[in-house]
Structures are given as structure tokens and as C-alpha cells.
Amino acid sequence: MSLLARPLPVSRPGPGELRVGMAVFDRHYDMPAEISGFAGPMVLLTRPTGLHWRVHHISVRPATQYEKRQLLALAVLHRTRLKGR
């Protein structure tokens, strides 16, 4: 197998590396979110729209700069839509 064909190692943050308020990407639901809490091995996630869910800590990774900007843009859009009501 050539060097280029090998899969790159995926870094997964351990439970101690995650913290409340941290922007992460949930691989299970394929969405960026913010950590709102912990329940054992589960991480409680929140989106700016108010969507809440929980997922096992191995399914999340730190968000990229692009994904952080997605969350900010979603928050601005959500606030704008709420003002229109």
C-alpha cells in the first residue's frame, strides 16, 4: 500500500479535552454545534436555533474555522428571522 493510499489518522478529543461553550462538529448528525453540558460519556449539544441533542463524545471533534463561521451565520439568521415576527 502506498503512503498516499493510507487513511490519515483521525484525532478524537477525549472527554477531558471537551469543555462547555466549545464549538464542535458532530460526525453522527453532520452538523456543527456548541457544547452545553455533559452526561457521562454523552455530550449535550445545542444549535443557535434552539435544537438540542446528545451524542457520544467520540462522535464529536473540534470545529474548524469554517464550521465556527457557519454557527455564527446561523445565529445571525435566526435572530433576523425572529425579529420579523
Image (cartoon, helix red, strand yellow):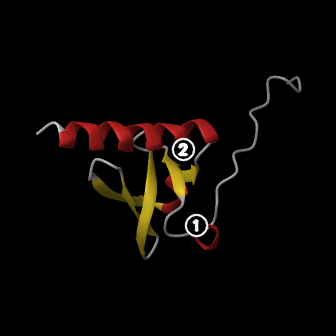
The location of residue 49, given as percent across then percent down, is 28, 47
Instruction: Tell me which residue sits at (45%, 56%) in the image.
Output: 34
Q: Report helix, strand or loop for mark 2.
A: helix
Circle 2 sits on which residue? 68
Residue 85 vs 58, above or below: the answer is above
Q: Report helix, strand or loop for mark 1.
A: loop
Instruction: Tell me which residue sits at (53%, 39%) in the image.
Output: 69
The location of residue 54, given as percent across then percent down, is 35, 60
Q: Amino acid at mark 1?
A: Leu
- Which residue is most to the left? 85
The location of residue 44, given as percent across then percent down, is 38, 64
* Left/right of residue 38 with respect to residue 11 in the rendered view: left
Residue 84 vs 35, above or below: the answer is above
- Which residue is most to the front? 83
Q: Quadrant of the C terminus?
A: top left
The location of residue 47, given as percent across then percent down, is 35, 50
Few, some or many residues within 10 Å of mark 2 (<14, 14–19, 20+): some
Circle 1 sits on which residue? 18
